[in-house]
């Protein structure tokens, strides 16, 4: 039997164009992300940053001839600054204070800076900052030397903690070793490995995408099925139905409502106002730009709760249509997720308005908010399909869902900071997918920068994991839906 190569018809050409378009979009996105992510793609705050100990007592009156020396070692790849806390004894002091950082392995001076003593107030910090981050100090023994030219009675005193002991740290006052540690902090940044090799990753992943698309294209020409092509064909075939169902769900939400779509603006603002009054006054969390912080959490969680709640009843609620007309059943939860996303996009408008009123001007990082929103939609689609399948067989799911969302809300840092959890309990937050979506958006909106590359991966994995789990369960159970509807 001689194999005859199939002719390339219009559909084959369209699939080929889709594959080429996908490659072009990937290249554009890779280049755009490189410039949008910017500095955060290559560097992050160092995990070796040394936090300042709690001040307990003064060291010595740092008059002329006195010296404070703190030996230490830090694991920071690019050291940026060192801060010291002072006591001025509530008096008017004079002179200058000098801070110097040395490498003890070769005695070379790394950074030096002089400060006006008269400007140092009680419990104030003096920060010695390098013009350019200093590299090559990772794990190297260092010496921080502090001295002044002040006269006795008009000199300040660096603060120290007597209860802190740390390996590799030692404190000398006028050449004499003492127990304790200077009240100082060291900050810097580390390289991000993925950022250093960004274009290698882009090239490798691009080759994978091209190979996969070529494989799909060849299978299509040979008349064989594939998951991606089937999805494209289904979306093309049923796009009118999807559009109608999304429109129906969106209109049904505001049917006979006086304010209508305006509730999409009003709801997040009212929730923010109530939570702001309660948590900023009763609990007094010290969170910068608290209204924006609240809105970011509320918008994300409200979408998750609403979309998954609507997807929960998507199959059961369309029982009459399912039993009469054949339509891929996954379309029903899909349309609920999409219609709810429209509400969320409208809710983003008051978020950005409040951010601007709070003094947060938009930066280029705001464009990156699209990424966590897409991941959130995929996550909700997967979770919604799981709930929709479970609802067909166990109708009690609709009652349990209300309890689950309440618990989930309190375990999500919407109105409180993650810092209120002790270290051994922070895993409760870190296993919550919504934490990463919310943190991603807060980083772009409040800090105006891109999150670290790791957070992109975390959002992607949670989204894909939920979709694979939900789709697998839904596909396995969908043939039995007709028996329970």
Image (cartoon, helix red, strand yellow):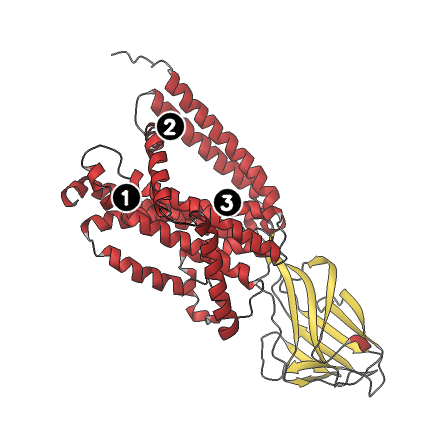
Could you give the CA–CA distance between mark 1 and mark 2, rounded to whole angstroms?
A: 21 Å
Percent x, y of residue 361: 63, 52
User: Which residue occupies 65% across, 71% down?
Assistant: 185
To which quarter of the image does residue 92 belong? bottom right
Name the disc covering residue 370, or none. 3
Q: Residue furthest left?
A: 483
Mark 3 vs mark 2: give the one in front: 3
Image quarter in which the C terminus is found = top left
Q: Is residue 284 something that shows in the picture?
A: no
Percent x, y of residue 342: 43, 44
To which quarter of the image does residue 425 belong? bottom left
Percent x, y of residue 186: 65, 68
Taking the image as shown, residue 79 lies to the left or right of residue 468, namely: right
Residue 157 versus residue 448 in the image, above or below: below
Could you give the CA–CA distance between mark 3 and mark 2, rounded to whole angstroms?
A: 28 Å
Percent x, y of residue 137: 67, 62
Query: Can you identify the residue that label 2 sits on?
Result: 216
User: Which residue occupies 44% across, 47% down?
Assistant: 261
**In front here: 393 or 465?**
393
């Amino acid at each position: 039997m001689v194999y005859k190569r199939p002719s390339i018809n219009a559909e084959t050409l369209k699939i080929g164009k889709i594959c080429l378009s996908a490659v072009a979009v990937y290249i554009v996105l890779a280049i755009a992300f490189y410039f949008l992510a910017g500095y955060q793609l290559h560097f992050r705050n160092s995990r070796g940053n040394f936090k300042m100990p709690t001040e307990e007592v003064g060291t010595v009156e740092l008059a002329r001839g006195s010296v404070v020396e703190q030996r230490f070692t830090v694991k920071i790849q690019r050291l940026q600054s060192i801060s010291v806390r002072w006591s001025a004894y509530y008096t008017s002091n004079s002179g200058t204070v000098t801070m110097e950082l040395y490498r003890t392995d070769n005695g070379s001076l790394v950074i030096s800076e002089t400060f006006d003593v008269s400007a140092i107030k009680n419990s104030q910090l003096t920060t010695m900052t390098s013009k350019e981050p200093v590299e090559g100090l990772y794990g190297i023994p260092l010496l921080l030397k502090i001295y002044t030219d002040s006269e006795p009675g008009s000199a300040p005193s660096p603060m120290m903690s007597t209860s802190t002991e740390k390996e590799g740290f030692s404190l000398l006052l006028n050449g004499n070793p003492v127990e304790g540690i200077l009240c100082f902090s060291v900050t810097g940044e580390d390289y991000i490995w993925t950022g250093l090799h960004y274009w290698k990753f882009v090239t490798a992943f691009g080759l994978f995408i091209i190979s996969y698309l070529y494989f799909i294209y060849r299978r299509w020409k040979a008349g064989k099925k594939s998951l991606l092509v089937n999805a494209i064909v289904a979306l093309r075939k049923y796009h009118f139905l999807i559009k109608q169902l999304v429109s129906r769900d969106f209109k049904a939400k505001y049917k006979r409502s006086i304010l209508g779509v305006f509730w999409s603006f009003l709801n997040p603002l009212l929730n923010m106002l109530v939570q702001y009054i309660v948590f900023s006054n009763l609990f007094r969390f010290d969170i910068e730009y608290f209204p924006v912080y609240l809105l970011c959490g509320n918008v994300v969680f409200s979408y998750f709760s609403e979309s998954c709640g609507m997807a929960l009843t998507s199959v059961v609620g369309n029982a009459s249509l399912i039993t009469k007309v054949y339509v891929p059943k996954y379309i029903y939860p899909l349309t609920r997720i999409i219609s709810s996303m429209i509400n969320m996009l409208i809710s983003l408008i008051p978020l950005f308005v409040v951010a601007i009123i709070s003094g947060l001007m938009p930066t280029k990082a705001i464009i990156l908010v699209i990424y966590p929103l897409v991941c959130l939609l995929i996550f909700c689609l997967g979770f919604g399909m799981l709930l929709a399948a479970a609802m067909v067989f166990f109708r009690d799911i609709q009652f349990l869902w209300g309890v689950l969302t309440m618990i989930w809300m309190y375990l999500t840092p919407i109105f409180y900071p993650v810092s209120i959890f002790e270290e051994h309990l922070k895993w409760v937050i870190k296993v919550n997918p919504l934490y990463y979506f919310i943190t991603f958006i807060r980083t772009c909106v409040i800090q105006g920068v891109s999150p670290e590359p790791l957070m992109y991966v975390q959002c992607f994995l949670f989204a894909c994991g939920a979709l694979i789990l939900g789709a697998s369960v839904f596909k396995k159970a969908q043939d039995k839906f007709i028996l329970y509807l």
